[in-house]
Image (cartoon, helix red, strand yellow):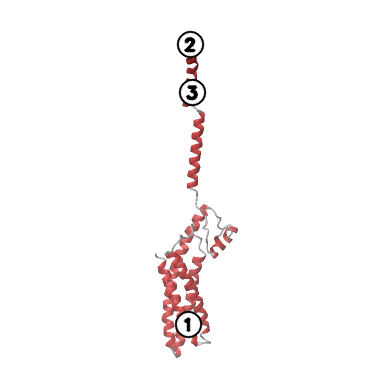
């Protein structure tokens, strides 16, 4: 009797083992786990390749006025804030910055001519003084226009894609020197208008002009590094 009982128990166990083997081979639970894993991997890949923000967090005030999320060009639908639009804006930015460098060198040449005329003007007399003074004034007007165009090309260009990296760089040095020569440019023009009433301001006018020229020349050089 115990032998028959043993055989009966073995027979009951065999179908269960076969069923477990089949379940292991074609278990839908395992298929579900694989699908979830694939989905998680796809989500992770999507997160890692997520596009960068279309605009940098920090922008110049003049750039934000025109190109910011709520800038004039966005509100007027002239430049919609899209990926394709930003790609076109970066090309515009490149063209404007190239023009910025060209007008910068033209302005620098005007500074050199103005410096030569100014040096001669300090010692000129009579008709020579009048001719040099007129030439000096004409050159000053040219420099102001060229300098203004150079500044506007930079200040109103579309913003770059990413913010500047931390640490000193040629671009940051260029910006710091721009503050110096912009201040010097304003001071030079103000002092130039005051010299007619007070000739004692000539040394200060000359110092402001030389400072402006030096900072402007250094800013053009720094952008190359």
- Give the class, few, some or many, for how many residues have Cα within 10 Å of label 1's Cα (few <14, many ≥20): some
Above or below — where is 196 with respect to 92? below
| Residue picked out by circle 2 | 2
Relative depth, front residue between 137 and 70: 70
Res 20 label: 3
Q: Position of residue 176 (x, y in %)?
A: 47, 69
As measured in the structure, the alpha-carbon distance from the residue carrying label 3 to the one carrying label 1 is 98 Å
Relative depth, front residue between 20 and 185: 20
Looking at the image, tell me whether mark 2 or mark 3 is earlier in sequence order.
Answer: 2
Of marks 2 and 3, the one in the foreground: 2
Circles 1 and 2: CB atoms closer than 8 Å: no
Of marks 3 and 1, the one in the foreground: 3
Looking at the image, tell me whether mark 1 or mark 2 is earlier in sequence order.
Answer: 2
Secondary structure at badge 1 equals helix
Residue 215 seen in render: yes
Secondary structure at badge 2 equals helix
Of marks 1 and 2, the one in the foreground: 2
Residue lying at the far top of the rendered structure: 1
Q: Position of residue 213 (x, y in %)?
A: 43, 75
Above or below — where is 180 with respect to 27? below
As measured in the structure, the alpha-carbon distance from the residue carrying label 1 to the one carrying label 2 is 122 Å
Above or below — where is 132 with respect to 169? below
- Give the class, few, some or many, for how many residues have Cα within 10 Å of label 3's Cα (few <14, many ≥20): few
Relative depth, front residue between 3 and 128: 3
Residue at the image position 47 percent from the left and 21 percent from the top: 17
Relative depth, front residue between 181 and 84: 181
Residue 110 seen in render: no
Residue lying at the far bottom of the rendered structure: 126
| Residue picked out by circle 1 | 204
């Amino acid at each position: 009797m115990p032998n028959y009982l043993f055989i009966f128990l073995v027979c009951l166990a065999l179908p269960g083992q076969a069923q477990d083997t089949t379940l292991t081979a074609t278990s839908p639970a395992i298929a579900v786990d694989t699908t979830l894993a694939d989905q998680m991997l796809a989500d992770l890949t999507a997160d890692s390749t997520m596009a960068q923000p279309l605009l940098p967090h920090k922008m110049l005030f003049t750039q934000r006025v025109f190109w910011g999320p709520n800038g004039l060009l966005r509100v007027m639908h002239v430049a919609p804030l899209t990926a394709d639009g930003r790609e076109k804006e970066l090309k515009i930015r490149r063209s404007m910055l190239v023009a910025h460098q060209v007008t910068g060198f033209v302005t620098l040449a005007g500074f050199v001519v103005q410096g030569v005329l100014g040096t001669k003007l300090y010692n000129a007399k009579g008709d020579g003084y009048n001719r040099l003074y007129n030439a000096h004034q004409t050159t000053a007007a040219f420099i102001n226009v060229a300098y203004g165009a150079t500044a506007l090309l930079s200040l109103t260009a579309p913003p770059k894609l990413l913010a500047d990296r931390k640490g000193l760089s040629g671009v940051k040095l260029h910006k710091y020197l721009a503050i110096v020569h912009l201040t010097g440019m304003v001071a030079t023009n103000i002092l130039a208008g005051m010299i007619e009433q007070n000739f004692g301001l000539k040394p200060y006018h000359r110092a402001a002009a030389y400072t402006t020229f030096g900072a402007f020349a250094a800013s053009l050089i720094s952008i190359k590094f």
